[in-house]
Amino acid sequence: MVAPVLLLSLVWAAGCPGTVRGKVVQDFQECGWFFQNKMPPQGFLGRSRLRICQRFKNHYHFATLYRTDLRIPVYSAYRYPCSMGESEGYRPSPWFHEPQIDNQNADSDMRSSTKARSTKQAMDGDYQDSGYDRGHLYPFALNDKESATATCTLTNAVPQEHGANVKWYQEVEAVAEKLARVCRKSGRSMYLLTGSANPSRTKINNRVAVPRTVWTALCCTVPPDQDQNRDPCLGDRAPPEDQDVLEYNRDFSFAFTKEMKPERAATHLTVRELQRKLPVDHLFLGCRGTSDSDERQTFQEVEGLIENKIINPVNNTGSPALRPFGYEATAGTVRSVCTYLVVPGRSAVLALSHGILYLAPVLHGAATVAALLLVNAFSVLIDHPRG
């Protein structure tokens, strides 16, 4: 019998340095590379909405559509990989606010919000003793360095109950990060949108609206422009992904939504399903999985990626095979042998060990058949005892 194997991964968020800058703009052209095909989502209509290219130490790190009447962001658009800057990130206290929201002639440097006052945006004092977390839309832990610090602005936060905030990380952010690493390992870039929806009547400090729903949509594809001067995210020099990250030779899209109560589980859905729920015209244009012809197949494949059931496809055609039940247990055993028993530097032995790893499904199948034969033989002996 093959015992079930539980793979537990713990991700620690480092803390959110320096003065952050943001710039209120007429359109997102100045930071358009954060959107797939450089096209912002269409359909988020209404007044009291401002576009912000979030800037820190001479780099744009993400983009935000901000709603001034509710004092919360509609969405933030960001990329993986896209870590820029030199210094390590940490969470500033207090968080930052955007002076240009209240005064377009103000300096674009984001400032400490301790003593600031605003009629159009949240301040750090609004969250004090409110019982709500400052919930990131663009998560702090996805990228690092100065890009992590840039996420610590109240124009990138919505009020979230602590338990719901923790669940959002576990059920959505950690899963989206896993898919983003698969995307990068496959020579692509991940475009992500995270937003809030369905504002409730609850307002912290009688000012900042508490959304009922938070959502994320993602698109894994090759950037349209390979010029680092026009797409600074291509200049990311982060270390390569680990060897155990899947290399998946396809574009894909996927979406999540969650009612922000601790007891409510996040929902997986297609991007088109999310568009209908919001409702908006489109979040991405031409990303695989956003049309009738490939929506369901793409969704099923991404669910397979999440559950570690997809075997690496060798080309872009057809449906990838699923790993057999118990594959991870067999492969994990072989990996342990490779890691702990093989002498480093013995290239021939290492090559043989990695070859055995790729034969893990066959080994598992043979072991399963042998186990079934033994069980059947044992059953026959019980049913027909000798003597």
Image (cartoon, grey):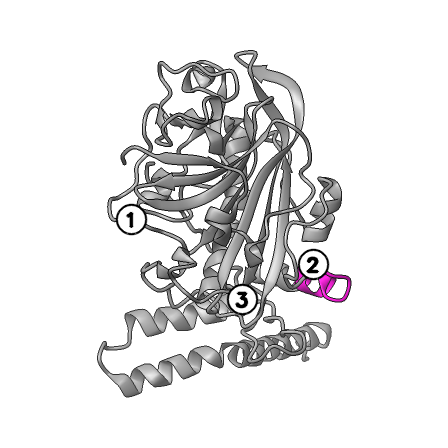
Q: Secondary structure at mark 2?
A: loop
Tell which residue pokes out farthest to the right in this image: 292
Q: Earlier in the sequence, mark 3 or mark 1?
A: 3
Spatial CA distance of label 3 from label 1 is 47 Å
Please tell me which residue is depicted at 55% across the width and 15% down the height of the picture.
Answer: 207
- Under mark 1, the amino acid is Gly
Q: Disc 1 on helix, strand or loop? A: loop
Query: Is residue 293 a member of the stretch shown in magenta?
Result: yes
Does residue 384 appear to the left or right of 98 in the view shown? right
The residue most toward the front is: 105
Q: Amino acid at mark 2?
A: Thr
Give percent across and percent down for residue 118: 47, 16
Q: Which residue is mark 3?
A: 2
Badge 3 element: loop
* 10 Å crowding of disc 3: few (<14), some (14-19), many (20+): few
Q: Is residue 97 visible?
A: yes
- Going by the numbered disc 3, the residue's amino acid type is Val
Q: Residues within 10 Å of mark 2 (few under 14, many from 20)?
A: many
